[in-house]
Image: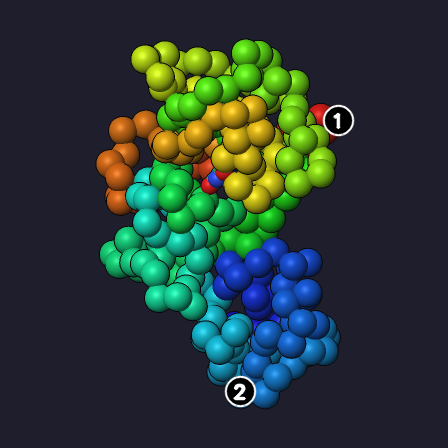
Amino acid sequence: MEEMRLQKYLALSGVASRRAAEQIITDGRVTVNGQKITELGTKVTESDEVCVDGAPVKPEGKKMYIMLNKPVGYVTTVSDEQGRPTVMDLLGDVNARVYPVGRLDFNTEGLLLLSNDGDFTYKVTHPKHKLDKTYEVLVTGKAKANAIRLLEGGVVIDGRRTAPAKVDVAEAGKGSAVLTITIHEGRNRQVRKMCSAVGFKVLGLRRIFEGGLTLGNLPIGKWRHLSPAEINLILKNAQSEGTKK
Ligand code: URA
């Protein structure tokens, strides 16, 4: 491996996009051979030991793109201060270091992408690309009469109105219902907060779709590689969605 700038090294390692890697460096989270480096121009080679937050990182030769059906009870981080299980615990047989592409709450299950390609992560997660994500939500409780229309029009959470959403009632039972909610924002606990804003209590939340990719019948707790067609599809959607207002 030729000598390269530290931010490129981090992007090739899948830690973050090149731009986000610059922030990680200036935040003082990176060491090279045990020494903290905050200088962006720093050059490294394969023989250097580069760590982020104390964990060694290495550029992967092969780009990996994975879909996991995340179970409830796992955090979407590489490690957890509270010692809770992480999605990494489910990837024991993946032969490369991959990182979550976006997040799902501890209590949310479903489609989670992981990759060691920092530029892919950037394209898929950047809010300006407005990738659609669909959630199945099991709700109960006494909601407002026009709850579905309110959710579709946008509700105020954390002091700011959500963008219009697409909402369908997939199943309606006695005292509970399954909604499918499609949003393109990725605000913190957004679907839970949207539902509670209109009076629903969320009993279960599962992501079933992201940027053209569907969970299909991938069993809970299992992962698979994305096909080249799936990688192209989500990148194409990230590009074209990005032109939306
Ligand atoms: N909305 C939520 O509330 N939680 C998630 O994990 C994803 C979307």
In this view, the mark in front (2 or 1) = 1
Question: What residue is at 26 percent from the left and 39 percent from the top?
Answer: 220
Q: What residue appears at the point 61 percent right and 84 percent down from the top-left corner?
A: 36
> Which residue was labeled with disc 1?
245
Horizontal and vertical percent position of residue 122: 60, 48
Type of the residue with mark 2: Asn
Residue topped by disc 2 = 33
Provide residue 92's location: percent of width, then percent of height.
Answer: 26, 58
Q: How is the rendered protein coloured?
A: rainbow
Q: How many numbered discs, if any?
A: 2
Nearer to the camera, 185 or 169: 169
Taking 225 as reference, is 39 left or right?
Answer: right
Kindly identify which numbered label has been placed on residue 222: none
Farthest residue toward the front?
142
Q: Quadrant of residue 37?
A: bottom right
The secondary structure type at the circle numbered 2 is loop
Q: Position of residue 156 (x, y in %)?
A: 67, 31
Q: Crowding near pointer 2: few (<14 within 10 Å), some, many (20+)? A: few
The answer to whether residue 228 is visible is yes
Label 2 or label 1, whichever comes before in sequence order: 2
Residue 158, relative to residue 183: is it above or below?
A: below
Q: Quadrant of the C terminus?
A: top right
Q: Secondary structure at mark 1?
A: loop
Rate crowding at label 1 as few (under 14), some (14 to 19) or many (20 or more) other CA atoms within 10 Å. few
Image position of 4 with respect to 166: above or below: below
What separation in Å lies between label 2 and label 1 (alpha carbons)? Answer: 45 Å
Asked whether 53 or 57 is in front, the reply is: 53
* Dot 1 amino acid type: Lys
